[in-house]
Amino acid sequence: MLAPAWNRQIDEAINKLPLIRNRYPRSGSSSNKVIVREGQSYHNFISNDYLGLSTHPQLKQAFKIACDDYGIGSTGAASLSGYTEAQYILEKNLAQWLQLEDILFMNSGFSLNSSLYKPLSNANTMIWLDKNCHASHIDGVLASKSRFARFDGDNITDLRSKISRLPDLLHLVISEGVFSMDGSSDYLADLIQLRKDFQDQLLLVIDDAHGVGVIGENGFGQIEETAFLPKDIDLYIGTLGKAFATHGAFIGGNRQIIDYLRQSIRAQIYTTCLPPAIHAASNAALSIIKSAEGVKLRQKLLANIGFFKTQTKNLSIQLMYREINHSPIQLIGGYSLAQLSYLAKYLQDKKILAGFIRYPTVAKNSPRIRLSLLATHTLDDISSLCYEIQQGLLYAS
């Protein structure tokens, strides 16, 4: 029982929240295309399991074997009993695949991003944060207590001008390869050029959580789609919770800076490591992503994205960033909040799960329906989705 004063304070805080988010427990399913809630099956257009590996037999087998070998949990922090051979092997394999000198694992992308910038900054640092960056980066920058400003990726010239006016500072520039609510970035090449032009001052951080394993011939992410490699930036952030279909996150780069972060990120030092079975399953996922099977899955996903964009164009459905967004995250936008609210409910009634995104997740004047396309979707799945979107928008109008 809370004290009355605390009850009042919590009630007032709840009433001030701009949005209440509901959770719905899902049951098990043999297919990543289907989500079962309370006995009802829904078509899945909301998950991050882009390649469909969450139900892959190789990942399941690796997970089970690791449980037999190590037990369930890691049982400690990395400096105590938590660091296992399973994690060590995955670190080495990931670093070799991405052509990076070293990799540091964290228990989640949010934990990594929200704790990264304090050890990287001091009174001599200016942080430049992309206006579309994930909330975890915002929290990390605020926690650093460093000077910072937001920048618009559509105006890198302005960012360049501002950096040039501060020649005595070190500059930390943060952006993403694929934005979780906006899709593909089309200015990574400009940021890499900026890094070259200010090579004595600038450290470039790119979070490609939604791109790694998914985009590019080798699966290196949006950075590869831009004709570069992860080693062309200073710090490359990825996740295991999306294309890899497991859990956790990693940051890679120069051995010296990664070792420094290993010794200085408190959220990594003072926490229990992920279960060894997660690392073993992630290593199995990496093997698939690197293989001919992984290439086929990426090609199938790319074909699904292209088909979706063609279908929506033929049906006069408005997409946000249609010409530049080639990621699995596709966005229905340009409609009113009321129209999209109706569409979200309509799709759910049709047993289709899609994300209804509005303020405060995105700007007040920019609501959208967020769809996640998967390699396991068929053309019929996507055709049916597009038809129901068209019908829902007609009714909403």
Image (cartoon, rainbow, N blue to C red):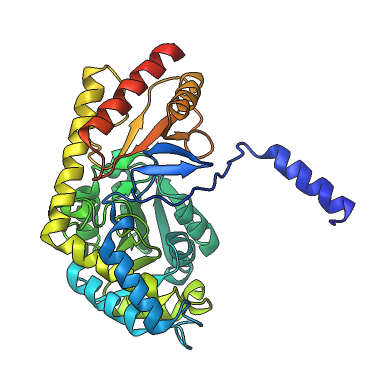
Q: Is residue 162 above or below residue 331?
A: below
Question: Which residue shows up at 40% across the image and 77% down it?
Answer: 67
The image quarter in which residue 310 lies: top left
Tell how many labels. Answer: 0
Can see residue 232? no
Give left or right: position of 106 versus 385: right
Query: Where does the image place residue 120, in percent across and percent down from the top left?
Result: 42, 69
Quarter containing the N terminus: bottom right
Q: Is residue 23 left or right of residue 314?
A: right
Q: Nearer the viewer, residue 122 or 135?
A: 135
Q: Which x, y percent locates residue 203?
A: 31, 64
Residue 312, relative to residue 164: is it above or below? above
**Residue at the front extreme?**
39
Which image quadrant is residue 143 in?
bottom right
Q: Is residue 60 above or below residue 5?
A: below
Indicate the position of residue 45 as horizontal and vertical percent values.
Answer: 36, 38
Direction right: furthest residue: 4
Left or right: 229 as drawn, with respect to 183: left
Please give the name of the residue rendered at 48% of the width and 64% of the height, measured from the top-left corner.
111
Quarter of the image holding residue 294?
Answer: bottom left
Tell me what residue is drawn at x 19 percent, y 31 percent. 307
Q: Position of residue 65 (x, y in %)?
A: 33, 77
Residue 255 visible? The answer is yes
Question: If the image is split into quadrants, where does the C terminus sit?
Answer: top left
Q: Nearer the viewer, residue 254 or 157?
A: 254
